[in-house]
Amino acid sequence: MKLTKIFLFTILFSLALPFFAQKDKPLRLGVVGLSHGHLWEVLSRLDRGDFQVVGVAEKTTQLWNNKMLRAKVDEKLFFQNLDEMLEKTKPEAVIVYEPIYDHLRVVEACAPRGVHVMVEKPLATTVQQAKRMAELAQKYHIMVLTNYETTWYPANHKAYDMIQKDGAVGKVSRINVYDGHSGPVEIGCGPEFLEWLTDPVKNGGGAVIDFGCYGANLSTWLMGGKKPVSVSAVLQHQKPDVYPKVDDDATIVLEYPGVTTIIMASWNWPFGRKDMHIYGNKGALYQDNAKDMRFFSGNKETKMVADALPEPYNDSFYYLKAAVRGDIKVKSTDLSSLENNLIVVEILEAAIKSNATGKAVKLQ
């Protein structure tokens, strides 16, 4: 009897070995597009070992001359055609650094091949595009994730826990989200990035899209995945000589039952910022940056530093690999989830419509 058990265990262990070996291997990653300024996220992690760039798809061959990328990725793995890259290199997942308008095109190519997709924020330029991406994801059983810098901020997660689990501020009544910088031209974004970032079709808008999406993402998360009842917005052209085609400043108001979120997204801040203030009937929380926080209770201010997040929840590429390999399950309420980001796109589209009509747009 003992010999039989040992034999069965040996068989099961040998069958499991390929599975565990695969989980330990670097994620086979495709890079789609090289025009996005956030490409540095891949470049800075090329030597880390958790992923291997197996293919690059970029139709503009001049952008192939990226010294850091070319030093680590064989020139034979660069393709102008996305379908060719997918067929020849067989990535498990792709990360997208193309115009937001092209995110749907990438999902259309990847979904039938079973290739998971992570796009840079936001998910899409229109609700129609976003819904089509969701249909494809569901049909072909792939993940379509959205990456935001603020998803990996320890301060945001500590604030979430203090509010949702500890009730630190009591009943939340107001969320103010501040995002932006002095402008993509002003901070020196490259011409290949500016070409589409300041285009109303390719990017979907200006600051309202580029930075409004952060607040919409965080508010949806903090509100447990609920849509706001209504969206109101005012978009400004404070620098029409610099950004003639798109807004450079957006104020978006989201109304929930008993809670108001104000998103202040701008290319006109005198400094770069991604901070948030949350108010309740018992106190307030300020997330000043990725780690530093302040808690206000009565007249007392307590400064805090949020602890580092555990792997894989501290990094977009660790998270992507863990999700693809099945080490974690992406919940519908997660910041990166498709469900959250469908609502984000609906909020942004409503904001643009509200500005055009001068009226609040109802979502529920």
Image: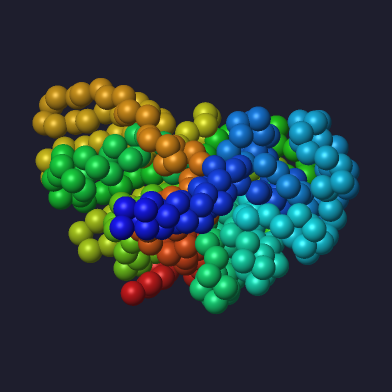
Q: Which colour scheme is used?
A: rainbow
How far across and how far down the image is residue 95, in percent?
A: 63, 51
Between residues 206 and 218, which one lies in front from this camera angle?
218
Vertical relation: 127 (above or below) 299: below
Q: In the image, is 169 to the left or to the right of 113?
A: left
For residue 337, what is the image quadrant? bottom left
Residue drawn at the location 28% of the way across and 62% of the way down: 256
Which quadrant: the C terminus? bottom left
Instruction: Relative to 230, say whether 13 is above or below.
Output: above
Residue at the image position 70 percent from the left and 67 percent from the top: 109
Where does the image place residue 207, in percent across and percent down from the top left? 56, 49
Residue 293 appears in the picture as rendered: yes
Can residue 329 be seen here? The reply is: no
Which quadrant holds residue 115?
Answer: bottom right
* Quadrant of the frame with the N terminus: bottom left
Name the residue rendered at 26%, 49% in the picture.
174
Q: In this view, does 275 lie to the left or right of 196?
A: left
Question: In the image, is residue 70 above or below residue 209?
Answer: above
* Residue at the (80%, 52%) spot, across then down: 58
Figure check: 113 above or below 118: below
In the rendered image, residue 261, in percent from the top left (x then y), is placed at 33, 52
Report whether 85 appears left or right of 302. Answer: right
> Whole-percent x and y of residue 51?
62, 41
What number of labels is visible? 0
